[in-house]
Amino acid sequence: MRSSLLAVSIAMALGAALPAAAQDTRDRELAELRAQLSQLQTRMAELEDRSDAQSEINIASQQAAEAAAKTQPKVEPRNGGLRVTSADGTSEFSLGGRIHFDAYAFDRDNADVTGTTDFRRARLTLAGKAVGWEYKVEQDFTGGSTTEGFRDVFIARDALGGKVTIGHFKPYRSMEEMTSSNEILMMERPFASATGIYAGRQFQQGVGYLTSGDNYSFGASVFNMRSASGPRNEGMGASTRATWAPINNDDSTLHFGASYSHENLNKGSADVSASAVYAGRRGPSQTIARTTGASGESIDTVGLEAAGAFGPLFFQSEYARATYGQPLGGDQDVDTWYLMGAWTITGERRPYRVGTGVFNSPRPNGPYGAWQLTARYDTIENKDIAGMEASSATFGVNWFINPSVRLMFNYTRGDNEFLGDKTNQFALRTQLSF
C-alpha cells in the first residue's frame, strides 16, 4: 500500500514539472530568435550603409571616367587603317596605305623586255586636319625614300564654296588620272593620262581649287612645271576640269566631263613628252611627241570624257588632243582615245563620287567577294609623223575579295606601228589598301 502511494506521488510530481520545463525551453528559443533577428537587422543596416557608400563611389568613378574621356583622344578603325581624333574634335589624323605587288611575263616580239615581279606601289599615307586645315603626306617607297617618293603632300582648307589645296598634288585633268590607283579598272591607266599624253607629269607643285554640287564638279589648278624631286625651273602650267552627271541615282549614273591643260616651258624646264607603254607595265615604250625644255614652247591639251554605270555594267571613254610646240617647223598634234568597259558578274555596281567626278570600285556583297570582267582598247598617234602610232587591247578579271583586298589579271596585246612590234603581256596583281 505504501509502495502504491509513493508511485502515485512521483507520477503527479513529474506531470507538474514537464509543462514547466517545456515552457522554459520555448522561452529560451524565442529569446535566441529575437537576438538573432536583432543581429540581422543590425547587419542589414550596416550593409545598407556600405551599399549607399559604394553607390556614391561608383557614381563618382563614372563621373571621373566621363570627365577623363572628354579629355582623351578617340581611337577607332577606319577602312582597315586607324583614325585618332582629339577630344574636342578639332584635330584628327588617320594612317593608311596601299601595297600593289605585280608579277608579269611577256610574249616577246621585237622588243627586249624582261618578265619578273615588281612592287608597283608601296605607300604609307598620313592624313587629317588641324584647327580647320586639312593635310596629307603620302610616301611611295617604290619611288624613293625622300622627295622622289612624294605623292600627295599638301595642306587644304574649305574656302569660297569649295576647297583650296596648296602643295604637291595632281592637276585637275583627265578622268582616269583623277581616279585613285586603288579604284582603276585595269592595272595600268590608259594613254589619256600621265601614262601617255601627260607622261611624267602626274604630280605637280601649285595651288588648286575644287568645288562640287549635287551633280557637278569643277576644279582648277595653277602649278610649277616640276615634281617634288624635279629640278628647279620657271616653267608654269594651268589646268581645269568640269564634270556633269545628268543621271545619278542608286541604279544608274551617266557622266560627262571636259578638261583643258596649258603647260609653258621656261628656264630650267625639263623636256616634256607624250609616250606609250603599249604592252603593260615595264613593257616596251614609244615616244610619240617631245618638246624640249630649252625651247620655251608650250603644250596645250583638251580632253573630253563620257562614262556610265547601269547596274553591274560600266563603260568609260576619253578623248584628248595635245599640241606639242616645236622650236623649228610646225607644232605636233597628238590624239589619244580609249574605250573600256566592265561587267560585274556578281551584280555589284561601281559607285560614283560626284565631288570629284570619278567612279570607285564595287564593294562585295557576298561571302565570296565580287567578280568582274574588263576590257579596253587604247590608242595614241602623232598626226604629224607618219606611222607614229601605238595601241593596246587589254582584257582582265578582277576579284574583290573584300573592300580592302583585290586580285587582278590583265592580258595586254601591244602594237607599235612605228617599229612594227607586237609584244604582249600577262600580268597579275595582288592589292591591299587600308
Image: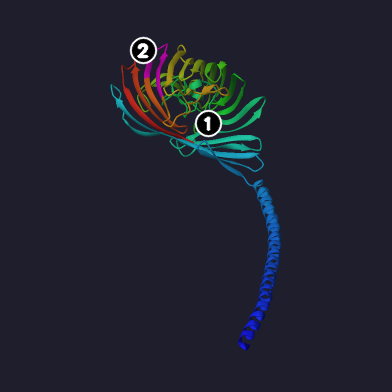
Q: Please provide percent x and percent y for residue 110.
A: 28, 21
Q: Residues within 10 Å of mark 2 (few under 14, many from 20)?
A: some
Q: Please provide percent x and percent y for residue 308.
A: 50, 17
Q: Which amino acid type is shown beneath numbered disc 1?
A: Arg
Q: Which amino acid type is shown beneath numbered disc 2?
A: Gly
Q: Please provide percent x and percent y for residue 15.
A: 66, 77
Q: Label 2 to label 1, Cα distance in Å?
A: 36 Å
The local secondary structure at tag 1 comes to loop
Prevailing SS of the magenta stretch: strand
Residue at 53% across / 17% down in the picture?
A: 253
Place residue 355 in its image quadrant.
top right
Task: Give the residue at the far bottom of this rendering.
Answer: 2
Residue at 69% across / 50% down in the picture?
A: 63
Whether residue 265 is visible here, answered yes or no, is no
Q: Relative to the observer, which residue lies in front, 114 or 39?
A: 39
Q: Which residue is mark 2?
A: 387
Q: How is the image coloured?
A: rainbow
Which numbered disc, 2 or 1, marks the residue that appears first in the sequence? 1
Left or right of 106, for residue 326: right
Place residue 56 in its image quadrant.
bottom right
Q: Which mark is residue 183?
A: none
Q: Which residues are magenta?
A: 372-393
